[in-house]
Amino acid sequence: MTTMRPQDILLPVASGLCCKPGGFHIDPVRPVERAVITHGHSDHARAGHGAVLATQETLDMMRLRYGENFAGSTQAIRYGEEIRLGDVRVKFHPAGHVLGSAQIAVTCKDTCIVASGDYKDAPDPTCTPFELVPCDVFITEATFGLPVFRHGDASDEVKKLLASVALFPERAHLVGAYSLGKAQRVIALLRQAGYDAPIYLHGAMEKITEYYQSRGIALGELRPVKGVKKAALSGTITLAPPSATSDLWTRRFPDPVTAFASGWMRVRARARQRGVELPLVISDHADWDGLTATIGATGAGEIWVTHGQEDALVHWCRSNGLRAQPLDLVGYGDEEESETPLQDEAEA
Amino acid sequence: MNRFAELLDRLAYEPGRNNKLRLITGYFRKVGDPDRGYALAALTGALSFKHAKPALIRDLIAARTDEVLFGLSYDYVGDLSETVALMWPKAALAGHNNPPPPSLSEVVTTLRTLGKTELPKQLERWLDELDETGRWALLKLVTGALRIGISARLAKTAAAALGDKDPHEVELIWPGLAPPYLDLFAWLEGRAEKPVNRDPAPFRPVMLAHAIEETDFAALDPADYIAEWKWDGIRVQAVAGRDDRGHITARLYSRTGEDITGSFPDLVPSLRLPGAIDGELLILREGRVQSFNVLQQRLNRKIVSPKLIKEFPIHLRAYDLLGDDENDVRELPFAERRERLEIFIGKLGDPRIDLSPTVPFTSWEALAVARADPASAGAGEDADAVEGVMLKRRDAAYLPGRPKGQWWKWKRDPHIIDAVLMYAQRGHGKRSSYYSDYTFGVWTAGDGGDELVPVGKAYFGFTDEELLQIDRFVRRNTTEKFGPVRHVVHEPDQGLVLEVAFEGLQRSPRHKSGVAMRFPRISRLRWDKPPKEADRLETLERMLKAEAVEA
């Protein structure tokens, strides 16, 4: 049996990660004939492809965002399920990033490459936990690929939020959180911490949050913030897309405390730049320790590093005896910085 | 240490004064002695130990981490203490129970006595024991870089709130207190008597004036008031008193109670008589008061050189007496205090301390004339250092704060120019949804004809209604966005003219225009005026020349 070179299986091209022997692209940033998609965030899941293979949840989220005709045809695949595409086998494994997120293992002959998309190895009550997949080449993100990023326990951050609500009962607490995944995780964590008051939602979060609930994720009583009187919002918590927390929209709240749930909040300058008063270090990406531990545990001898702080992570891999290279893929990044609200709800 | 670190962390992000107060008071309530006392000391700048140098911190991290990874991280974070706090890899203590993190008291008391050679090992131990926020606070504390936007006054006010006391009461006894302030907290919590201030030269909270409006005069009788010049210097309190052994201690305080004696050693020998003078710090050259710009050369200096003292001879112009020898005279009417002050200054007979003259007047019209032309009304050659007039009720006791109707300030009209709004930036806190910080410019000849050059920045002076109007204008007329900054249209026929009032001008190589304004604020919105009719840089340069002649 011949062993293929990994770059003969997967190769970065302008439209994304291309699998020639399988005839598909992973998370393509431009319309392609056949797309295999890791998760529903807009920088990974775009509209306009011919055929899309993804988990049911990811397909549903794409439908919510782009409408019924987001792709020519779709095919749902379950975690652990393997299908054959051209000369390769494709298998989906949970990535622990958001609901429905997957790592994609591509095997050709006896070489296995795992494209992990975005992932985290920390507990999250709103999605299936990350699964470690042994492989020959591991493609990892590097969003938080610097040793200053250590996210700690997200439930401690939620305690910080609740302590602030207790200290300032007459003010409204406005939590900026990406509307797909982060918002629902924060709500679930608040419930875990025993907070059982209604939680308010910015209009752009309603659809996707309802979808989470329809998938059996318990989030307690949620209310749209639209139309609620200013005075009635004292002492309440509202989740909103990050971009809304520093805009005209905030004027409907009584003396709001602006919080932001993000891994970036680890760094003061980032928090201050955004005018955040209560930074909450809650991330849906692996932190430095998570990235390095995962890389080591896959057993992969070769690491490809994409979107984020590639330099530091590549340096770490090489210092630890692993072959590593940055993959210059463009078009992915920080979903929090580039959030586009779901259709029809931009004004809410 | 962790709770103090949490407090600092939260304070660092909180823009609102009242919210800061609540955070600090909340901390004092939750945390016991002596930790909270050392926290109060840290916030008021009352801690003293040798600070660790950044090089030491760099050495510690270099021994623990990869150089490249540290470099990349430092580049990204931009702050040494924070980078080290975040990436510090804890030593693996296999089989050990982790020691508890140090308390703030432990850190402070250890640092006080620790030898220089023992510091690195000790810091390393603490860094291993603390979490990210704890390490950050520790490093800020030991490097002496605890800049979190909290004034000593604010911290004392927060302490006072713990016992529902007036912050002035804390201010009064403060000079006699020392960390960890056990007696202070005992009193604030109703467990003990108020601590007695044994300081021979304590600060007394100052009395402030209201700005007078045209409409106020109708209700005021000129006969009830004494007028004096309002000098453009620095308000200070000069206090001298005898200690237990009969020696004189002299101190100079800023209006907020900060001890600034060290910056003006040349004034200390003049404070020979026990008493407390309220007055203005000025620079006098050959008997003439110099402009504020000149005085500024002597402020915020770390080292006061003999050359500086000689070139900028300091002077105290007295206008009130709060303590006369051992007697507290603050309860006496102003007219009586003024008489005592005249006697006191006469007895002192010191060339560095003189009396601020009163301005005689019989009607408000007469005073308006004097205010418009101080030179002819008694201020003579010092008229340029006159900012306006002060009105003080003859029967007013010396009350801390800004009591209504007792003291008024009636400033001369400020300098005014019409400038064009160029850039707008989001505000902070409550204003974070508004574009409330404005950069404005005036016209000057450029390579391709007239162009606007920025001359200053202002973020107050407008009403809430005007803020809404400007905010709307900014949003609708943005030409470019750079992060939180918006470029606002500023063409000869398109844009918004702001009337900007300011107190003075200075040459400034840091500004492209070469001038910097003192205390600029938006005084009016000139919707009626096209930008091309706004002022030119030459106008400012003329004003600058006029000021330079005075200086």
Image (tube, rainbow, N blue to C red):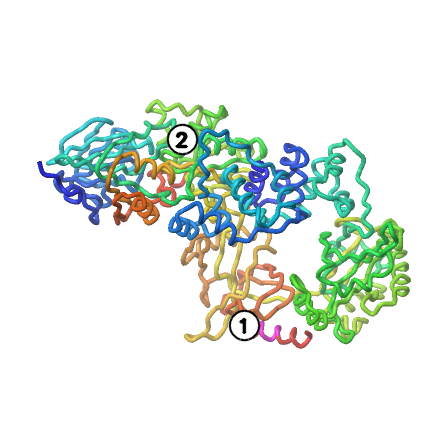
Q: Give the mark toward the camera: 1 or 2.
A: 2
- Camera-side residue of B203 and B143: B143
Residue at image position (15%, 41%) is A9
Magenta includes B542?
yes
Q: Nearer the viewer, residue B395 or A125?
A: A125
Q: Nearer the viewer, residue B533 or B59?
A: B59
Q: What secondary structure is the magenta-colored segment mainly?
A: helix
Residue B141 at x, y percent in the picture: 58, 46
Q: Residue at x 52, y 37 (%)?
A: B129
- How many residues crowd mark 1 within 10 Å: few (<14), some (14–19), many (20+)? many
Residue B2 image offset from top left, x and y in percent: 56, 37
Q: Residue furthest front?
A: B117
Identify residue type, mark 1. Leu
Q: In the displayed structure, would residue A51 be above or below residue B278? A: above
Identified at 52% across, 67% down, the residue is B511
User: Does the magenta segment cover residue B381?
Assistant: no
Residue A245 in view (yes/no): yes
Magenta-drawn segment: B540-544
Left or right, residue A144 beside residue B281: left
